[in-house]
Image (cartoon, helix red, strand yellow):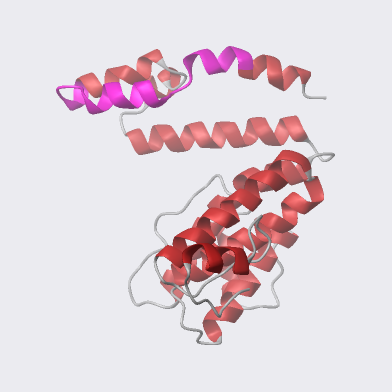
Amino acid sequence: MFEYAIGVINVLEKNIFDYNDQRRMINSPDRENAFKVLFDTDLAESSIKEKDIEEILEKDLISLREFILKTVKEEKIELFWFLFLKYDALNLKIALKGRFSEKEYTNSYFKHSIVDFSEIKKKLEDNKNLINNQYVNFMVEKSKELLEAKENFEIEEIVDMVYLKTKLKIAEKIGSLPLEIIKLEIDIANLKNLIKNKDKFVEGGNLSQDNLINLLDIDVSVSI
């Protein structure tokens, strides 16, 4: 079912914005010359209409979102959720910071998430509101629960941990490569936390808590 998508990707990847393009932009003598680099990439069309790099990248991600959603359709919708859940996690961080702080954090959010930012805000305001996606709904509920329990966590840490657990749930439905990817992500996150002497551990990676404790000789007591 992915023959068409593979064909489109093979064409697009020849002009994709890559590491070499990044280096060219960084080494450009000024903003004007840096911007010209985009005209040699798949961002050329957007660059003609926009002059703000953030707007260009956002429109490119929205376009990618629609392409993937159209390609996977309902039969493989979990793959779309797996790829874009991170933007809902980022939106959740923004919404939580706005809820638990007097500062205004909700003026800017990611429009290429699975669900609209407004759904996350409504869920935080009233837990009875159900988000139109079971995984995003779980992620918001669990993060809110941990925060309101006044655990010794920061918003960033809570959402990152719950995000990994949620993404693991999606990957378990898909299997194959996505499951391998999220297990590796969990291992890396756990390793980073242990190196930083933080007592946060997410179950479900390739390496158990005991494996990492023995490797790094660090005491850990908290997991989710």
The answer, for residue 221, to whether it is visible in the render is yes
Residue 4 in picture, x, y percent from top left? 74, 18
Q: Quick check: 16 above or below 190?
A: above
Query: Which residue is located at x 62 percent, y 19 percent?
Result: 9
In the depicted view, which residue is nearer to us: 13 or 20? 20
In the depicted view, which residue is nearer to us: 7 or 206? 206
Query: Which residue is located at x 77 percent, y 43 percent?
Result: 77
Residue 42 in picture, x, y percent from top left? 47, 19
Q: Quick check: 32 above or below 175?
A: above
178 displayed left or right of 26 = right
Residue 47 location, quadrant: top left
Q: Quick check: 112 above or below 13?
A: below
178 displayed left or right of 23 = right
Q: In the image, which residues are magenta?
A: 10-32
Residue 18 in picture, x, y percent from top left? 43, 24
Query: Which residue is located at x 46 percent, y 77 percent?
Result: 153
Q: Quadrant of the C terminus?
A: bottom right
Q: Is residue 130 magenta?
A: no
Residue 198 location, quadrant: bottom left
